[in-house]
């Protein structure tokens, strides 16, 4: 909030060309490994190759407004091309849950899962393996579990942006869906997991960090 208001202050007081972009969740294969979207794609890709055993999650009911970083950077450029500097919300206006993102990820890996249990006992079990990209897995295996360590005491249950101003004034609309973004992240993380698995198979000591 300080950054937002100091930008407004300098714009109004000193006539500096400065804009605020209020960015909702934006992801790509370059996202940090501890952010939840990348944690999911990377963790599950590692599991398919036997580099990890299970993905431990917090609140899977949380919903987020996820977009692709490419769309957001394009919007950043557009907001700096205005004759008059303004502030814009950069978001997709569409939500999905953490649980949905997990489901998209396993589908991109050629798997099907079923969520079982209630509360902290909830877990996901493999019900089908549709291709050979998951040599370390078997039907009936549990690959996702809840872990109370990842519950946030100040959890934000829902995030949703309203990019109507950007659409109306700049003609910006996101071009990449969250599901397409998820698939791109999975493909990148799976390629890396396969490399690590191959190195380990041939006796090289590969340190795979886990969250």
Image (cartoon, rainbow, N blue to C red):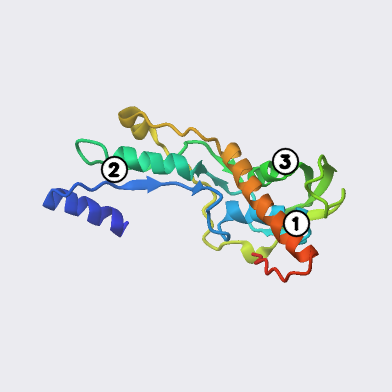
Q: Position of residue 36 (x, y in %)?
A: 58, 55
- Residue 147 visible in this rendered orientation of the protein: yes
119 sits left or right of 59 in the view:
right
In depth, the one of 78 and 57 nearer the eye is 78
Q: Which residue is mark 3?
A: 107
Q: Position of residue 187 (x, y in %)?
A: 65, 45
Tell me the SS state at disc 3.
helix
Asked whether the beta carbons under mark 2 and mark 1 sit within 8 Å of each other, the answer is no
Residue at mark 2 to residue at mark 1: CA–CA distance: 42 Å
- Asked which quadrant contains residue 103, the reply is top right
Q: Residue at x 70, y 68 (%)?
A: 206
Question: Badge 1: how crowded within 10 Å, few (<14), some, or many (20+)?
Answer: many
Q: Which of label 2 and label 1 is nearer to you? A: 1
Q: Is residue 105 above or below residue 3?
A: above
141 sits left or right of 47 in the view:
right
Q: Which of label 3 and label 2 is nearer to you? A: 3
Q: Position of residue 182 (x, y in %)?
A: 61, 43
98 sits left or right of 122 in the view:
left
User: Which of the image's four quarters has the N terminus?
Assistant: bottom left
> Sequence-wise, which precedes: disc 3 or disc 2?
2
> Sequence-wise, which precedes: disc 3 or disc 1?
1
Residue at mark 3 to residue at mark 2: CA–CA distance: 38 Å
Which dot marks residue 47? 1
In depth, the one of 98 and 83 nearer the eye is 83
> Sequence-wise, which precedes: disc 2 or disc 1?
1
Asked whether the beta carbons under mark 3 and mark 1 sit within 8 Å of each other, the answer is no
Q: Position of residue 114 (x, y in %)?
A: 79, 44
Q: Is residue 175 above or below residue 11?
A: above
Tell me the SS state at disc 2.
loop
Which dot marks residue 87? 2
60 sits left or right of 15 in the view:
right
């Amino acid at each position: 909030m300080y950054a937002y208001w100091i930008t407004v202050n300098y714009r109004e007081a000193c006539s500096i060309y400065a804009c605020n972009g209020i960015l909702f969740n934006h992801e790509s294969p370059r996202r940090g490994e501890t952010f939840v979207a990348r944690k999911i794609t990377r963790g599950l890709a590692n599991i398919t190759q036997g580099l990890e055993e299970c993905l431990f999650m917090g609140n899977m009911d949380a919903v987020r407004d996820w977009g692709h970083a490419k769309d957001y950077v394009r919007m950043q450029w557009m907001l700096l091309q205005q004759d008059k500097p303004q502030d814009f919300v950069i978001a997709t206006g569409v939500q999905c849950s953490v649980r949905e993102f997990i489901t998209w990820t396993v589908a991109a890996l050629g798997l099907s899962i079923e969520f079982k249990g209630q509360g902290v006992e909830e877990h996901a079990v493999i019900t089908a393996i549709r291709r050979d990209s998951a040599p370390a897995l078997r039907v009936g295996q549990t690959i996702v579990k809840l872990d109370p360590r990842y519950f946030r005491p100040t959890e934000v249950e829902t995030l949703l942006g309203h990019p109507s101003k950007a659409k109306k004034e700049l003609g910006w609309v996101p071009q990449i869906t969250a599901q397409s973004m998820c698939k791109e992240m999975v493909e990148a993380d799976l390629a890396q997991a396969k490399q690590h698995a191959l190195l380990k198979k041939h006796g090289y000591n590969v340190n795979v960090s886990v969250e």
